Image (cartoon, rainbow, N blue to C red):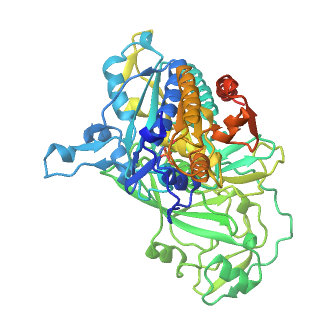
Amino acid sequence: MLWSNFFITTSKETPKDATAASHRLMLRTGMVRQLSAGAYSYLPLGFRSLRKVEKIVREEMNRAGAIELMMPVLHPIDLWHETGRVEAMGDVLLRLGGPEGDWRTQTVLGPTHEEVITEIARAYLNSYKQLPVSMYQIQVKFRGEARPKSGVLRTREFLMKDAYSFHDTVESLDAVYQKMYDAYCRIFARCGLPYVAVEAESGPIGGDASHEFMVLTDAGEDVVALTDNQDYAANTERAVCAPLPQDDAAMADIAEIETPNQRTIDEVCAFLKSEPRQMIKTLVYTLAYGTDKKRATKTVVALVRGDHEVNENKLDRAAIALLAKTLGDETSSPKPQAPSLDLADEATIKALTGADVGFAGPHSLTGDYLLVVDQAVSVMRNGVTGANKTGYHVQNLNPGRDFAIEGETVSVADIRNVTDGDQSPKGSGAAIRLRKSIEVGHVFKLGTKYSESMKATYLDKNGKAKPLIMGCYGIGLNRIMASAIEAHHDDGGIIWPMSIAPFQVLILALDPKEEDVMNTARALHDELEAAGIDVLLDDRDERAGFKFKDADLIGIPVRVTIGRKGLADGVVELKRRAGDEIDKIAPGTAAARVKEMVKGELQRLDAGK
Ligand code: ATP
Ligand code: MG
């Protein structure tokens, strides 16, 4: 391909709002162009990379035994009502507008395809003899992301590979999940991504177990917890906290102390000259549950140490488990279903504590409530917390003595976010480090969540109808591209991994008006192209410095520079984008050397090195 025949729109300007390197570089290289918030065009250079990512993903899915299909973007909203996900997805699920009763108001744009694939499975997968089966598609997804961010890392329209598997046994699901997990490792390795697989929260997709594949970089919005000895890796949304040991200080007498207008942890600490880790944060929530017709609420009080943050996923689970225990099995009592936990309003807090917001403590509450105590609070001694009296706190509050940590309506659980420096929950003593990261892929064991709600059953060996057991597996193709740039760039521009570079080789003709130069450049170009190598020949009549800057910016992995002076000395220059060394070689040997470099590099990536 000749540069002059292609469409490349490099620019020196660094867009002001682009903080992520990938965002900046994708705009500066003209790989993408923003059309509106969260919607991007892939210009020819960017599209070539995206197609290469797609090819790798497709090859690995096929290798893992998944079969390709294609499902529609337009979904009838009724399908989403079957699984209750119209509510669970909220504003992420984009609806078409139109007059009432119009088909448009009954249609949504697919953010993911569990419902659609389950509808297909319900129609065709009727016997255990057809199982297991895995299917995938590579298709545009739409999500009403509130804050599109960092270029193509978070958009409202993006390309996802989504795969779904169906099984008659948990063992079969486990085996395919492992196959997909391995396929993901190969995909990311082949794309040149330094990734880690971490335990993950399932979120509104639901299910029993899941892993996310993360690229560690400050441009990411996720935070993962990793240990130095690699015995534990999890998203902080889910990371388990190792239990802390009991503080064995002597219990002092509880004392009320006036703290006028001191409400926040920092204010109270400064006022009392204590540390946040001595404080007990008392948070009041309202837990709603039950069916749409019969909804009930319960007040939940959660305690975490002053230097810790509540993890709402964990608190959710602990609160629901405690609620289920208190409700008992009587058929007349509401079930703890469709729970939603929100911070309580002022009136609820006032009724419970008898004080203004900011002065709550667990020791003298009135009314009906559930108490969930973080494990780290349960081992504290002589804590400081609100006095349930406006303008007052108490010191020397002791769990077990001043408030219950056992009983029907109390539970001690891990409900906090892991913090940097915590110990590994595996008991190795290794320290946890928190790292920002980008989620590029996610695999889930769904179990029967969708097949049960959509009544997708098969007949087992004994002719008995059973819900299909499912797995699902997603990868963001645009995010792979952007994360590769995050991981591989320098001040000059992108340093593409060979496998997903828009072109593998750049021939830079320094004096394109010289016949000798262009003849040599064209001959090399044609020979490489004939060997199946993606080669771009910069034939523009521009200054050398300008062309070198563009070459560094667009980041083609191998560069061959051909100029009049070099040819007079009988050499062309060979350089890797990733290094500084320049190799002067005879023009006749260039094609063989370049082929070897491309092949070697692809093999290295294939081998996951
Ligand atoms: P996030 O937590 O970042 O919003 P998610 O957990 O909702 O992502 P999944 O439903 O697991 O995402 O989707 C599968 C994959 O699709 C993700 O791993 C990610 O690579 C990609 N993806 C998800 N949302 C977006 C988006 N808004 N823009 C680009 N890619 C996305
Ligand atoms: Mg996810």
Evaluate whether residue 573 shows in this view: no
Residue 474 in percent (x, y) is at: 49, 35
Residue 527: name its quadrant.
top right
Q: Is residue 59 above or below residue 330?
A: above
Relative to 197, is 426 on the left or the right?
right
Name the quarter where the C terminus is drawn.
top right
Residue at 51%, 61% in the rendered image: 13
Residue 515 in percent (x, y) is at: 54, 34
Relative to 377, is 235 on the left or the right?
left
Relative to 223, is 428 on the left or the right?
right
Residue at 57%, 78% in the rendered image: 358
Give whichever of 173, 61 is nearer the camera. Answer: 61
Residue at 51%, 17% in the rendered image: 65
Give whichever of 362, 543 is nearer the camera. Answer: 543
Relative to 340, is 389 on the left or the right?
right
Residue 570 in percent (x, y) is at: 72, 32
Residue 415 in percent (x, y) is at: 63, 55
Q: Which residue is situated farthest in the right direction here?
A: 249
Give whichever of 284, 91 is nearer the camera. Answer: 91
Evaluate whether residue 147 shows in this view: yes
Residue at 54%, 81% in the rendered image: 355
